[in-house]
Image (cartoon, grey):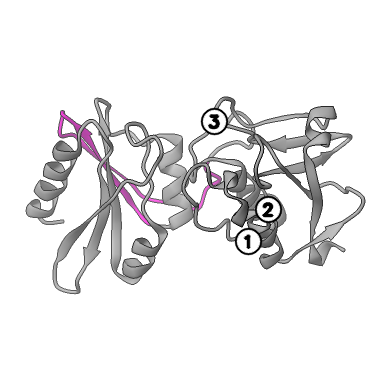
Amino acid sequence: MQDQVLSKILAHAERDFPREACGLIINTGYSYTIIECENTSHEPESSFLIDPLVYAQWAEQIACVYHSHPNQSPEPSPADIASSERCRVPFMIVGVPSGEVFTYTPSGVLIAPYEDRQFVYGVMDCLNLVSDYYRHKLNIIINDGERKTWGWWQDAQHETAFVDGFIANGFVRVDELQPDDIIVMRLGGGCPNHAAIYYGNSSILHHPSRDCNSRIEMYGQYWRQNTVCYLRYHEKN
C-alpha cells in the first residue's frame, strides 16, 4: 500500500489523539485512498465505531479498515479481532505516538471463547455473543444489526426494536424454554435491551454489561423478573 496512504493515516491518528482515529482504506481500481470516519463510540479514547451507513456506502471498495491505539502498541485487541472477523476485512492498527503499524487479516476463527469476553459496545456485547454462538455452534447466521447510539433503550420509540430485530432474523416467540433459546430482558429501565442464551439446567450464557465479562450463571430471580419474552429460531420448532 502506498506510503502516502500510511502517512495520511498516521496524520489522522495524531490529529485525533487521544481519541482513537478510524477510517477506511478504499481501492479505487488503480490506487488506494482513505476515507476518514467519525468515531461514534461512546468511549472513543479506548474503542471505535464507524457509522454503518458510511461503511455500507463504501463496502464494495473497502480494502482495509484502519484505526489508532493511543498510547498503546498496535497489537490487535480481542475487540479488533472480533470486528475484523465479522467484517471479513483486514484491520490496520497504528500506535500513537510510536507510529508502529500492525495489520490483522481475518481467518474465519471464533474470535473469543464465549465466556470471559470483555465488553465493548457494538463489538463484543450481548448481541455479538448471540451472533457468534449461533454461527459457530448452530451454523445459523444472525445479522446482529447496526448499533444505535449508546443509551438508545431510554427512548420509548424503541420499545419493540430489540425483539423486532430477532423476529426479522427468523425467531418466533415461545412460552417454554429449550436450550439455545434467546431470553430477552429489560435491564436498567427503558426498553428491552438485553439478550441471553438459555444454556439448559436453569443457566444462561450472556454478556450483561460493560461492568462485567461474559459468563454462564444461573437464571435466577433478578434475570427472571426482568425477562420480557423467550425466542426460538423458527427452524428449531
Q: Secondary structure at mark 2?
A: helix
Q: Amino acid at mark 1?
A: Ile
Front one among 27 and 175? 175
Picture residue at 80% right of the left edge, 65% below the top = 234
Question: What amino acid type should be assigned to the residue bearing mark 2?
Answer: Tyr
- Which residue is tagged 3? 210
Q: CA distance from mark 3 to mark 1?
A: 25 Å
- Cβ atoms at labels 1 and 2 below 8 Å apart: yes
Please indicate, yes or no, whether residue 107 appears anywhere in the rendered image: no
104 relative to 47, above or below = below
The residue that disc 2 covers is: 134
Specify the amino acid type for callout 3.
Arg
Range of residues picked out in magenta: 89-111
Query: Residue visible at 36% across and 50% down?
Result: 105
Residue 117 placement, left or right of 232? left
Q: Is residue 144 above or below residue 186?
A: below
The image shows residue 63 at horizontal and vertical percentages of 28, 61
**Mark 2 closeness class: few <14, some 14–19, many ≥20 residues within 10 Å:** some
Q: Which residue is mark 1?
A: 141
Which quadrant: the N terminus?
Answer: bottom left
Q: CA distance from mark 2 to mark 3?
A: 22 Å
In the image, residue 102 lies in the stretch drawn in magenta:
yes
